[in-house]
């Protein structure tokens, strides 16, 4: 797949696959894990695709000491081990999980050549211990006589002692674990090495041509995480709902409606985009709650493969978003810059002028500055296409029919909070925290049971929320029940309680235990 992804032929793909298998079979015991082996295989396969023949790819990587394929063992590689420690996307071979996700590997054939050729004073094992480096380290299973099925012995380097020069200290210091590992792999080496070496010799003599291999149709699948960031009330949640084609994030005209990261999944046959809807970026943090919200934004940016930066087209400038785009460009993060709400400007000339203004400010930091109307859906398809082009190759992270990984309780609490934002003014929406204490699903024909707790910071706020004779809270629950029933697709019964939790927005322990677990 590495060869085909880079324009190689079907024969290149076969040769690259054999190269990967060979590298795996001949891998050293220095301990780099499968990730390092895959990185080595990626570099060698890339060379194979460029050189058109496996033999040339092996020689240019330093794997071959002579035309008779005297193959050395791969030494532990400090450079590739370092790359493996911070990589998640192996050049189209798929990616690890996202927690799994770190930044992209930059494994090149040149780094592989440096490793295989033995450059540097030594190599670093995973434990951090430095080991003497040998330019050629032969595997015992490949050290047969030239007349056997294995390859002939290579000439040993000056720093590698010959058999007759090895001391008793060397023999006493033998690693029993390494010997046991060698014994376990002996059968696999015996079965495979003759076939592979015969294939290599046949390839070097021109026995396999490109037209001898039938082309294989391979589907290319892309997947990744896309963080949507911007100032409060810029339209992030509206945009994600529009791209998903359903209401997943609550939306109100008040700023700071979104407090937590909300995950939405858009899948088709060839791709899967995992959206991360984030809270609005707050310039001046006044409470611990706002501090946690900014922390969520930064974490989503670090986890994302692509970042959508949104600016409000009705505002003359967005210096914070321009600076954020510049910093992500410096960190080699793919960015798509969107100017939202341009349809709210009165004239077409003013819309074009505002768009050109942002292109001039961020054009050097991103290859895509797109006009957008998240509310009307204008430009949404162009944005989705731009995101797909920038996603790394890889398998789907979630089942294709999933639209989110959040729980029903989470969405129920969000729907109740949305109604609080819609029905109350002033400070009430911002001091109210909603949690679902219980949700019981009941058989068809019976109502599901929902128990909701609303926290406020003052007794006066509790009185406003409940209203005279409880009328306000009853109307709130009636509106929330309708939204919840539309969401779950059946009737529900809601029981609500209102309590006072003094200054909960400034209580770090409370926030960690409730809204921001794991942050």
Image: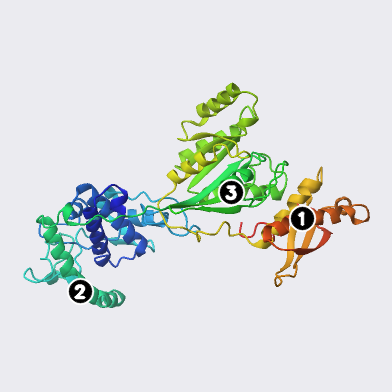
Marker disc for residue 480: 1
- Please determine whether, in this image, residue 360 is positioned above or below residue 38: above
Q: Residue furthest top?
A: 349
Is 298 displayed left or right of 131 in the figure? right
Q: Which residue is mark 3?
A: 245
**Residue 276 showing in the rendered view:** yes
SS at circle 3: loop
Q: Residue furthest front?
A: 445
How far apart, in angstroms, are the residues tagged by discs 3 and 1? 22 Å
Q: Nearer the viewer, residue 178 or 322?
A: 322
Residue drawn 55% across the image and 38% down it: 324
Residue drawn 47% across the image and 55% down it: 101
- Please determine whether, in this image, residue 417 is positioned above or below residue 366: below
Q: Residues within 10 Å of mark 2 (few under 14, many from 20)?
A: few
SS at circle 2: helix
**Residue 133 showing in the rendered view:** no
SS at circle 1: helix
Q: Residues within 10 Å of mark 3 (few under 14, many from 20)?
A: few
Q: Are marks 3 and 2 in contact (CB under 8 Å)?
A: no
Give the mark, 1 or 2, whose residue is nearer the N terminus. 2
Q: Where is the C terminus found, in terms of image quarters?
A: bottom right
- Front tag of 1 and 2: 1
Q: Which residue is mark 2?
A: 191
């Amino acid at each position: 797949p590495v060869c085909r992804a880079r324009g190689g032929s079907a024969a290149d793909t076969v040769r690259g696959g054999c190269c990967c298998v060979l590298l795996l079979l001949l891998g050293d015991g220095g301990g780099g894990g499968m990730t390092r082996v895959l990185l080595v295989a990626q570099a060698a396969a890339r060379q194979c695709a460029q050189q058109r023949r496996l033999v040339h790819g092996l020689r240019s990587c330093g794997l071959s000491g002579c035309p008779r394929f005297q193959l050395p063992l791969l030494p532990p590689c400090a450079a590739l081990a370092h790359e493996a420690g911070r990589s998640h996307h192996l050049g189209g071979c798929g990616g690890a999980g996202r927690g799994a996700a770190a930044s992209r590997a930059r494994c090149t054939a040149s780094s592989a050549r440096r490793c295989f050729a033995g450059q540097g004073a030594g190599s670093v094992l995973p434990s951090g211990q430095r080991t003497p480096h040998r330019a050629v380290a032969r595997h015992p299973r490949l050290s047969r006589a030239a007349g056997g099925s294995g390859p002939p012995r290579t000439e040993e380097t000056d720093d590698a002692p010959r058999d007759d020069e090895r001391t008793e200290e060397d023999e006493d210091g033998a690693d029993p674990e390494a010997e046991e590992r060698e014994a376990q792999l002996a059968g696999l080496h015996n079965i495979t090495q003759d076939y592979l070496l015969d294939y290599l010799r046949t390839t070097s003599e021109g026995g396999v041509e490109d037209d001898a291999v039938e082309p294989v149709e391979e589907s290319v699948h892309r997947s990744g995480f896309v963080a949507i960031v911007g100032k409060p009330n810029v339209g992030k949640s509206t945009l994600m709902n529009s791209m998903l084609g359903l209401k997943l994030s609550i939306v109100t005209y008040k700023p700071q409606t979104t407090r937590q990261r909300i995950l939405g999944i858009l899948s088709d046959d060839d791709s899967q985009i995992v959206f991360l809807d984030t809270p609005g970026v707050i310039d001046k943090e006044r409470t611990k709650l706002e501090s946690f919200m900014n922390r969520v934004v930064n974490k989503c940016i670090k986890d994302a493969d692509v970042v959508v930066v949104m600016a409000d087209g009705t505002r003359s400038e967005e210096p914070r978003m321009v600076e954020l785009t510049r910093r992500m460009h410096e960190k080699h993060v793919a960015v798509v810059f969107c100017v939202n709400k341009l349809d709210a400007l009165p004239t077409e000339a003013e819309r074009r002028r505002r768009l050109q203004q942002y292109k001039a400010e961020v054009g050097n930091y991103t290859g895509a500055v797109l006009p957008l109307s998240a509310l009307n859906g204008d430009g949404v398809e162009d944005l989705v296409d731009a995101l797909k082009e920038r996603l790394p190759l890889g398998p789907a992270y979630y089942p294709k029919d999933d639209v989110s990984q959040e729980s029903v309780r989470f969405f129920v609490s969000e729907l109740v909070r949305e109604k609080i934002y819609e029905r109350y003014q002033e400070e009430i929406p911002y001091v109210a925290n909603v949690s679902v204490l219980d949700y019981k699903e009941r058989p068809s024909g019976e109502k599901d049971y929902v128990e909701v707790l609303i926290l406020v910071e003052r007794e006066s706020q509790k009185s406003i929320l409940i209203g005279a004779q409880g009328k306000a809270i009853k109307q709130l629950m009636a509106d929330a029940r309708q939204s919840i029933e539309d969401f779950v697709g059946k009737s529900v019964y809601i029981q609500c309680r209102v309590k006072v939790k003094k200054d909960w927005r400034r209580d770090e322990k409370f926030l960690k235990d409730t809204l921001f677990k794991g942050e």
